[in-house]
Image (cartoon, grey):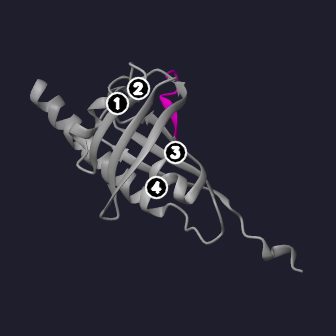
Amino acid sequence: FSFFSKMVLAGKLSTELGIKTPADKFYKLFASELHEVQVHCERVHHTKLHEGEDWHDTDTVKHWTYVIGGEVHTCYESIEEVDEKNKKNTWKLFGGEIDKHYKAFKLTLEVVDKADGTAVAKWTVEYEKINEDIHPPNGWMDYLNQCTRDIDGHLIKRENVAI
């Protein structure tokens, strides 16, 4: 019997991306315009309310269809925490592909202003695998990086058109 034979099932992955959109504007999309994400990010194919009437109510459940690693996936999502002061939201993801691999799956976005007028979007995925044969959700990092780039590009373009 080896003390080290048991693999860790829980983990956390994070990525920080510099964005040109001001933090307030980028965060606002996720805090009060979440239904617009599919307009800005080509990897998000479809979003709809599954339960509830308000996209930003913590009792609401949304259904997402998205592409990771070239494959279409679906899951449900609910808001776990909203911290507008610190521009930080946490969502719980479940159902669909998520439940096939993970007991728990949380996604956190924190957007921070930088002194030069740009900002940083920090994404964190916390997960617990259903068994040790499941790989960490590394594909999610690529997905979040690409969606952040797409959204930042659209918001900057929209801002430049408005000027």
Separation of marks 3 and 2 at Cα, in angstroms: 20 Å
Q: Which label lies toward us, 3 or 1?
A: 3
Distance Cα–Cα, label 2 vs label 4? 25 Å
Q: Residues within 10 Å of mark 4 (few under 14, many from 20)?
A: some
Whether the residues at callouts 2 and 1 have beta carbons within 8 Å, the answer is: yes
Disc 2 element? helix
Magenta span of residues:
84-92
- At numbered mark 4, what does the secondary structure look like: helix, strand or loop? helix
The residue to which callout 4 is attached is 97
* 85 magenta-colored: yes
Decide: is 94 above or below 67. above
Name the kind of residue labelled 3 in the image: Phe
Is 102 magenta? The answer is no
Badge 3 or badge 2: first in the primary sequence = 2
Cα separation between marks 3 and 1: 18 Å
Earlier in the chain: of badge 2 and badge 4, it is: 2
Q: Looking at the rendering, in which quadrant would you find the C terminus?
A: top left
Q: Residues within 10 Å of mark 3 (few under 14, many from 20)?
A: many
Front: mark 4 or 1 = 4
Residue 94, which numbered label? 3
Q: Residue at the spot x=49%, y=46% of the render?
A: 95
Q: Report the residue marked by disc 2.
A: 31
Residue with the mark numbered 1? 34
